[in-house]
Image: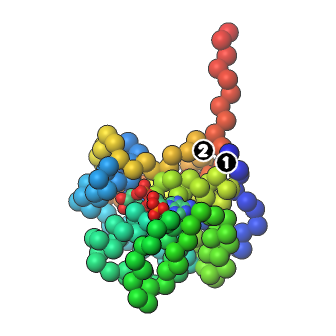
Amino acid sequence: MVNVPAEGHDGDMATRYYTASSLDGFIATSDHSLDWLLKQDIDDDGPMSYPSFRAGVGAMALGATTFEWIMANNGSWDYTLPAWVFSHHDVEIPDGANIRRVKDDVRAVHAEMTAAAGGKDLWIVGGGELVGQFADAGLLDEVWVQYAPVTLGSGAPILPRSLDLELLDVARNRDFLCGRYRVVGALHVAAESLD
Ligand SMILES: NC(=O)c1ccc[n+]([C@@H]2O[C@H](COP(=O)([O-])OP(=O)(O)OC[C@H]3O[C@@H](n4cnc5c(N)ncnc54)[C@H](OP(=O)(O)O)[C@@H]3O)[C@@H](O)[C@H]2O)c1
């Protein structure tokens, strides 16, 4: 069951899923490659770019696979933001990293993140199923997607839920079609008339 996003944010603070996707709705290939994404061109000073999004963020949450991809591909944890990594196993946290390992209850984690974020936005990095858990709890306010000009055919789904979204903004940033959406709530479609 999906609830509508909760009211009562501090100021304009919002919980946002910011991600890049293939045109057919995958954020990674089935073997967790992002080569199709990293070869694209984007203007860091352009619309909906990562630096401008990142400037508003006060805390981040991510799943174990995404965390392990970052560690394997970057070789280090460079974020200074407070971060929450969801996992049921012992992911190896680098010494000194501002990271907590958590599991199961996204509501409790969301409350911790809000307290740590100093009134800034929360970034749910992914993957899609974790973002879906925040949406299920009514805790996801917006989805920002940078669509790369590729189709993958299969892979890690962007957001495996049935949600109604409102398109708030759209832009082109070089290779990317960028959209910003408000999460309205569960998708309800009227039964088709047979008349
Ligand atoms: N295109 C982009 O911009 C973008 C953005 C983000 C991620 N990605 C990529 O997309 C892929 C996503 O991988 P993924 O679909 O496997 O998702 P993921 O969320 O990164 O990882 C899934 C894992 O997170 C843990 N998890 C999720 N919810 C949990 C909960 N409530 N409690 C405890 N643990 C929980 C589980 O780990 P355990 O098995 O340890 O329990 C689960 O197997 C990765 O390859 C990543 O690099 C791409």
Instruction: Establish if 138 lies above or below 72.
Output: above
Can residue 60 be seen here? The reply is no
The relative height of residue 66 versus residue 145 in the rendered view (above or below) is below
**What label does residue 163 carry, if any?**
2
Depth check, mark 1 against mark 2: the one in front is 1
Could you say where residue 125 lies in the image, as x and y percent from the top left?
A: 47, 65
Label 2 beta carbon within 8 A of ligand 1: no
Looking at this rendering, what residue extends furthest in the bottom direction?
A: 96
Quarter of the image where the N terminus is located: top right
Q: Position of residue 39 (x, y in %)?
A: 23, 59
Ligand 1: does it lie within 8 Å of the C-beta at label 1?
no
Q: Residue at 67% across / 23% down in the picture?
A: 191
Distance CA(mark 1)–CA(mark 2): 8 Å
Q: Is residue 106 left or right of residue 98?
A: right
> Where is residue 107 drawn, in percent x and y?
67, 65
Vertical side of 43 occupied by 32: above or below: above
What type is the residue that disc 2 sits on?
Answer: Leu
Residue drawn at x 28%, y 70% as measured from the top left: 73
Q: Amino acid at mark 1?
A: Val
The residue depicted at 38 percent of the width and 53 percent of the height is: 27
Marked residue nearer the N-terminal end (1 or 2): 1
* Residue 2, label in figure: 1
Classify the position of ligand 1 by quadrant: top left, top right, bottom left or bottom right. Answer: bottom left
- Report which quarter residue 92 is drawn in: bottom left
The number of discs equals 2
Q: Position of residue 46 (x, y in %)?
A: 38, 66
| Circles 1 and 2: CB atoms closer than 8 Å | yes
Q: Could you classify mark 2 by the number of other residues whose Cα lies within 10 Å: few (under 14), some (14-19), or many (20 or more)?
A: some
In this orientation, does residue 111 appear? Answer: yes
Question: Residue drawn 34% across and 54% down?
Answer: 28
